[in-house]
Structures are given as C-alpha cells and as structure tokens.
Image: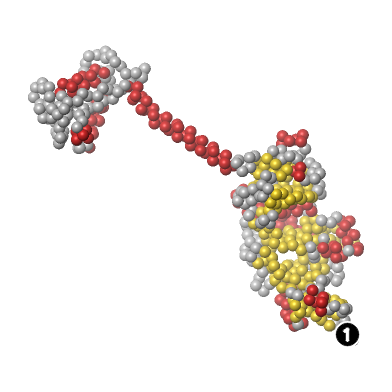
Amino acid sequence: MFCPNCGFELDGDLRYCTECGYALEDAKAVLNSVSNEVAEEPSVINEAAEEIFASDETEKEPFAGAEAGEEKSPVESEPVADEEDDQPKDDVSSGATPSIPAVRADRPKLSNPVAKPVAAPAPAPAANASAQKKEPKALYIVGVVVGLAVIAIFSYLLFFSKSGGDVAHYGQDKAIVVVQESKITPTDAKGEKLKKYSVTLNGDNGYSTNAEVKGDEGFTVSQFPDVKPGKYTLTVKDSKSKVEWSIPVKVVDNSKSADAVKEVSLEVPKANEADTKTGEGDKKDGGTAADNTATHAAYKQKCQEYLACYGEPQIAEVTDSVYAMRGLCLVDLVDFDQDGQPELLTVVNGMSDAELKSAWNGDMEGLQKSYTVEVWSSADGGIKRLYSQNWLDNSNGGTMFLPLIKADGGSILVSQRTYEMSNAITALLAGRQVLAGDNTSVYGKKSDAFSLVSNYESWGVAPSEGNGYEYYCASEGKEISETDYNALYQQFGYGHNHRTYYFLDFSTSGYGTISGESHVDPNQVAAVAKDTLKKVGIE
C-alpha cells in the first residue's frame, strides 16, 4: 500500500507511515466512512477521484498545510444531496464499498513531513451544498433588481423632476390643452426655469395681451384678463437674453378639465424633435438658406405667432386702383451677413380694411408707421429680434416700400429714408425755409446685432437772394460737403438695390425689373411670404 499523505510505499498493515508518521488507521476510517455514505452514488466518488488526479497533473506544489504544520487528507469529498428530499442519506442499503483508484506512487514527497496525526474533518451536511449552488443565482437576482431601481430613479429625475407633470416643446404643432388654473412653467435652452420673463397671448379671435412674470414658479392662464375658450399662441420672452419661444395653446372651460394638463413644463426641442419641414434654401437672396432644422423650427414659432395675431397676407383696395397689404405681409429668408445662416425678415400690419382706407385719405404718415419691419435670428432653440422699425419709405406718387441694399462687400442692408432732420442740421438751418430733403440711414448685421452702417442727409433751402436751392448736407449729425454726400449716396443709394418690396402700390400686376433693380409688387410679396411659410414647415 501507499501512504495517502506522502505517497511512500509501505509494507503490511502498519498503523503509522514510517516515512512521514501519518496515522494510517485514521485515513482508513475516513475512507470507509465516505464509502458507506455514498454507496448509492459510486459515480460521484469516481468523478472526485478523477478531479484529484487531474489536479495532480497541474499542481506540483505540496499542500500549503504541510509547511504550516497542518495535516490534510489527500481527498476532501463533499456529500451529495439526494435529489428527492434534498437531505443527506445517513443509512446505506448496500454494504459494498465502491472502488477508489489508488494514489499515484510517484506523488512528490513533502519537504517538511508532519509527524503529528490529525483526525480527518467530518463531512459537511448536504444541505450546505444546495445552498452554495443557489447563492450565485440569488446574487444575480439582487443585482438585476438594484439595476432596475437605479434606472427607474434616473428616469424620474430626468423626465419628471423638473416639471412635476407633462412636458411640451416650443414650436410643436399640437396645441397644449389648458384650463384657467393650469400651471405653465417655461424653461430655457439649458432646461433651467426662467426667473424673469414676459408672456404674450394672441388668440385667433383677435384677443391679444401680455404679462410680466417674476420667479421660477410658472404662471396660470387666470393671470390674463378675460381669456375665453379658444385657440391661442403663447409666446415667452426671456428678459435677460431677449430670446423668444412660442407654442400653440387651446384654452377650455372647467367642464373639459379632464382633457387639460394640470402642470406642464415648456422646453426647447432637440434637433431631432423639431417638427418642421426644411426646404432647399432661397438662393435668390444673395446667399444659401441653410437647410437647418433647428433654425427653421425657431422661425416657425414666430410665424405661427404672427399668423395667430395678424392673419395671412391680404391685399385691400384702399381707393380706386390703389392697393395696400395687411396681416402678416412678408416673411422672407435673407442672409444679411452672408454667413450661410439666413435671418428671418418680417413685415406686419394690424389695420383692418376700413382703417387702411381712412389712413390713406388723411394720415399718410400714420399709414407709413403702421407697418412694422423686423429682422430675427435663431438663438437657443428660439428666436431673437435683431432689428425693428415702424416705417416704410414712400415715393412722391404715394407708393410705400421697403428697400434692401447690397453693399460692396456683398452683405445686405436695410435702408430707411425719413424726413426728419438731425439736430446739427436743425440748428444750422434755424430760421431758414426748407424746401425739400431727406435723411437716409442704412443698417446691417454685425456679430449678433444690427447697427448703423452709414447715414447721410441733404436739405435744400431757399437762397437768401434769387431762385433755386442752397444745399446743406450732413452725415451722422456732422455737416459734410455736397461732394462727400454724393459719394455716400453712390455707395449706399438705391443704385445698389438688392430687392424692393412694395406694400402699397397702384398696381398688383408685377414690375419684373426696372433698370436692373428687383421690384416686388404686393401680389408677389404675398407669394414670397407663403413660399417661406412652407420652408419653415407651415402649409
């Protein structure tokens, strides 16, 4: 036989190993006990033995316990639970002992054999084996539950913690349904609640009002006076950044409160959430209108607001063969600074047909001032106004128009000609008879704003003696020579016309071109507006 501890070959029935002192009778008792307990499962023993020999092939180091002064049985078997009752079998029906392959004779000897015999450890209960097999599955289930909980908490913080209710996006087509007490909380492009802003409510029924809001708690429709059920456009303007956002709103009475939101957060849409249609760009404007979804979505908001407030472009006959535009007269995409990103040019007039006729018959200057010209750019998912004037140029014949001038560098400028003298000329001509003259200012986009590019004025006064005119000229409030004035006129005058839009004219048949300059009559202006509305997603 061989010593199960050191593998030394022994003769006869010895009680201790003559090589290492291992207690051979204790080893025999352990082996007999194991054999009796697994008599019904001989295959388990064979598998255990195969694992032992396999480990001998790869592990050529002695047992760690040998150096620590511990004795260890070469075979530590684990009882196998019965599949029927999951309990260890204490009784073995058969007395046969299954064969166990002998330990290999060439097993390496321990460098420090232990002479003190130690009893082999008792087998562990079979129930522990079952528990150890189930433990990894339990950990897996716990991990899944924890992971789902983390996802749920993150989703709540992401989608609900800011608003505490529903979410709507500026510029969306679908109106949010609200009642008087619905709480509306606007946010900016960063998702932060606005703290100081103005709110404008424009209704399809002609209703229009606004309110100032301070604090980040939002507002309710009840803060607006006499709001009736109907369709409106809600516009929010941040007092700090001057950026505006709009969204359609449907106000219902309390009997339909079940359809309304109790709380809603207004948020800037992401680029892929913008509900817009993009066009190929208007290349007639001296630049390429970028097919940018976010930009068009922002412009769409302003167009929706103005359509709700002023209505579509309309042409009224104010007197025989004289036509004037009203409503949302013009919407056009113009790349003023030639950076590839077009700005939005709008012209609106809120007069009725009767008011237009009355102004034509007695208040021409009031009629000129009734048209509001604005230039907008997209910013932070909304829109920002860069320029505004309440004025149209007019001719001696009575036409009213908006000229755009093309500068030498290619940029597009807004030209405004009035009949107001600068303070310098007023002081210079005090007591003189002014016979004619005008004051022209030209504005262009610089960085993120419009500013004055040039100003020139010329006034003709009656001479102190004889007939004719004496001319006095100025630029930006300072007197200049007539020669300098002519140079500015040549640089920024109508000879550099880019496009002239007519809003009051004696014809609606179209000019085409006059001396190479583009002139657009009221019917053509309306067509430009409708085409631009399609480009930003409004049919």
**x and y percent of residue 48 in the render?**
25, 27
Residue 367 visible somewhere in the drawing: yes
Q: Between residue 261 and residue 353, name the one nearer to us.
A: 261
Q: Nearer the viewer, residue 502 or 378?
A: 378
Q: Position of residue 264 (x, y in %)?
A: 67, 42
Image quadrant assignment for residue 181:
top right
Q: Residue at x 73, y 43 (%)?
A: 220
- Lateral position of residue 113 relative to residue 211, left or right: left
The residue shown at (85%, 71%) is 396
Residue type for callout 1? Ser
Dividing the picture into quarters, in which one does residue 156 lie? Answer: top right
Locate the N terminus by quadrant: top left
Q: Nearer the viewer, residue 386 or 507?
A: 386
Residue where numbered disc 1 is placed: 464
Percent across and percent down for residue 394 are 82, 68
Task: Please say whether residue 279 is visible from this viewpoint.
Answer: no
Toward the left, the furthest residue is 11
Q: Residues within 10 Å of mark 1 (few under 14, many from 20)?
A: few
Numbered-mark total: 1
Quick one: SS at disc 1?
Answer: loop
Q: Height in image: 482 above or below 248?
A: below
Residue 25, above or below 348: above
Relative placement, left or right, of 507 versus 408 is right
The location of residue 248, given as percent across then percent down, is 72, 47
